[in-house]
């Protein structure tokens, strides 16, 4: 089977790594891929959101299965286009991906079907939004309605901060058309966890639990990033909580999507806020998380292609999915300055010896080959992932990998997984 993976980040490297272990797969392409992916797949210079380009490539090479990483092409309807052309592709349709692409859509869906989430209001008029903020008071959360590359959410500690966010999103259009409309939410307290599940549109199967670290500095200080690391399992997601989340959130959501004529086939990812053993939805994503996918793929035992085929065929209920009992921890090494401005093109050393360490997988996020050498090419550069019998062991393994790698300006958090240790594991 010939497989095309769309995207070029750490999530896609982990997916390609897992797919490469399938006995069913004879050839892997990645578009556009990166320097790490290039060791396992043929990288083709087509951008992840160039749907006509991807379609032409898949047709020309007679690709049997396409797997989509990022939300952009999903929201743009890549799955609909491939399906119309008679090509197999894994991910939700454009209409189903709206659960991530429009915060208003997902909030209205949750309200209609009684899925637990923060109280909210939706506004296209700035004066009305501001009046709502002043009525509700702070803390309060302001979100651009559309896709804003993981930005576009302001957790405001004061009313003034919330009003500034409204100005930034609705007037200055910091996130373009994504800010034509805003969702304003009650600020929830608690601990966050990522809950991902496979769905064939009817059956929902939970993946192993995970948690990411969004802030750039240790102890959750500094600005938000795309994610500075992740670990799995997340001890806060107990068996009991998992059951509850499936029953009150994941299954009702997939059923709601079917009722709305938006059958959800793919990965449904709920960002949860957990407080006193109770979970509420912060947001839905219509795809694998990044960097959560790195530790998740490190732990997945079942052939990913088998799971994807079952989803496409609607036979997920008959497919067992198993996980290694080990813990996995992914530490992101980022470019100097990230999540602000940073430079690219810094040569990376130590990659080969790190990757040779036992139970270490070095997933590349933003790398490119320059004159035959691997160099930095993005804000998040590497996701060094360690596997071990306990979280503590996985942390040690991941950091041993990190210590062997260097590039000018590199920075990473020193406390990835620490929260899992506190919760006890
Ligand atoms: P989102 O993209 O909607 O998940 O928001 C990004 C981040 O903002 C989340 O991971 C939370 O840290 C925070 N956040 C979003 N919504 C809320 C909320 N209602 N209450 C508290 N924090 C929130
Ligand atoms: N790790 C957060 C996300 O993938 O959206």
Image (cartoon, rainbow, N blue to C red):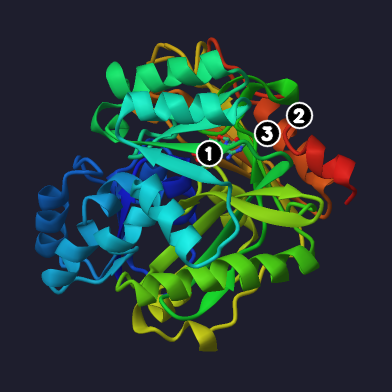
Residue 211 position in % (x across, y down): 66, 46
Q: Residue furthest bottom?
A: 318
Provide the residue designation for mark 2: 415
Residue drawn at x 71%, y 68% as measured from the top left? 244
Q: Is residue 381 left or right of residue 261?
A: right
Q: Secondary structure at mark 3?
A: helix
Q: Nearer the viewer, residue 372 or 379?
A: 379
Provide the residue designation for mark 3: 401
Residue drawn at x 50%, y 11% as measured from the top left? 337
Dot in front, 3 or 2: 2
- Tag 3 near tag 1, CB within 8 Å: no
Crowd rating for badge 1 (residues with CA inside 10 Å; few <14, some 14–19, many 20+): many
Crowd rating for badge 3 (residues with CA inside 10 Å; few <14, some 14–19, many 20+): many
Q: Above or below — where is 423 with respect to 151? A: below
Residue drawn at x 40%, y 22% as measured from the top left? 166
Residue 147 position in % (x across, y down): 34, 39
Earlier in the chain: of badge 3 and badge 2, it is: 3
Q: Above or below — where is 228 with respect to 52? A: above
- Tag 2 near tag 1, CB within 8 Å: no
Residue drawn at x 55%, y 73% as measured from the top left? 251
Provide the residue designation for mark 1: 185
Q: Secondary structure at mark 1?
A: strand
Q: Above or below — where is 416 with respect to 306? A: above
Ligand 1, image quadrant it occupies: top right
Q: Is residue 207 left or right of residue 129?
A: right
Tell me: is circle 1 under 8 Å from ligand 1.
yes
Q: Secondary structure at mark 2?
A: loop
Q: Is residue 101 left or right of residue 53?
A: right
Q: CA distance from mark 3 to mark 2?
A: 15 Å
Q: Nearer the viewer, residue 83 or 60?
A: 83
């Amino acid at each position: 089977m010939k497989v095309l993976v769309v995207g070029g980040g750490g999530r896609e490297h982990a997916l390609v790594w897992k797919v490469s272990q399938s006995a069913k797969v004879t050839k892997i392409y990645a578009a556009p891929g990166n320097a790490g992916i290039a060791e396992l797949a043929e990288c083709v210079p087509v951008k992840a959101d160039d749907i006509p380009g991807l379609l032409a490539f898949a047709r020309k090479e007679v690709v049997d299965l396409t797997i989509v990483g990022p939300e952009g092409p999903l929201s743009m309807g890549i799955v609909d286009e491939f399906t119309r052309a008679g090509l197999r592709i894994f991910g939700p349709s454009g209409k189903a991906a709206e659960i991530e692409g429009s915060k208003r859509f997902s909030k209205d869906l949750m309200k209609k079907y009684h899925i637990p989430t923060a109280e909210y209001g939706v506004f296209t008029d700035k004066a009305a939004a501001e009046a709502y903020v002043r009525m509700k008071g702070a803390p309060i959360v302001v979100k651009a309605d559309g896709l804003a590359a993981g930005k576009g959410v302001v957790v405001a500690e004061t009313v003034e901060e919330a009003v500034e966010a409204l100005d930034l999103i609705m007037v200055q259009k910091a996130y373009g058309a994504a800010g034509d409309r805003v969702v304003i939410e009650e600020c929830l307290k608690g601990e966050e966890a990522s809950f991902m599940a496979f769905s064939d549109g009817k059956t929902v199967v939970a993946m192993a639990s995970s948690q990411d670290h969004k802030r750039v500095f240790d102890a959750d200080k500094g600005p938000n990033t795309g994610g500075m690391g992740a670990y799995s399992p997340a001890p806060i997601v107990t068996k009991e909580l998992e059951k509850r989340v499936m029953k009150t959130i994941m299954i009702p959501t997939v059923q709601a999507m079917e009722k709305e004529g938006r059958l959800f086939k793919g990965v449904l990812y709920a960002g949860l806020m957990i407080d006193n053993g109770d979970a509420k939805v912060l947001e839905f994503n219509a795809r694998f998380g990044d960097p959560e996918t790195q530790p998740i793929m490190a732990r997945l035992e079942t052939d990913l292609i088998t799971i994807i085929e079952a989803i496409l065929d609607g036979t997920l209920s008959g497919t067992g999915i198993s996980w290694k009992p080990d813990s996995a921890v992914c530490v992101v090494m980022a470019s100097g300055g990230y999540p602000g401005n940073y430079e690219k093109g810094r040569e990376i050393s130590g990659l080969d010896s790190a990757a040779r360490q036992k139970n270490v997988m070095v997933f590349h996020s933003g790398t490119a080959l320059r004159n035959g050498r691997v160099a930095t090419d993005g804000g998040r550069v590497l996701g060094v992932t360690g596997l071990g019998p306990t979280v503590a062991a996985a942390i040690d393994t991941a950091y041993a990998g990190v210590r062997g790698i260097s590039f000018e300006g590199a920075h990473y958090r020193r406390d990835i997984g620490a929260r899992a240790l506190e919760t006890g594991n």
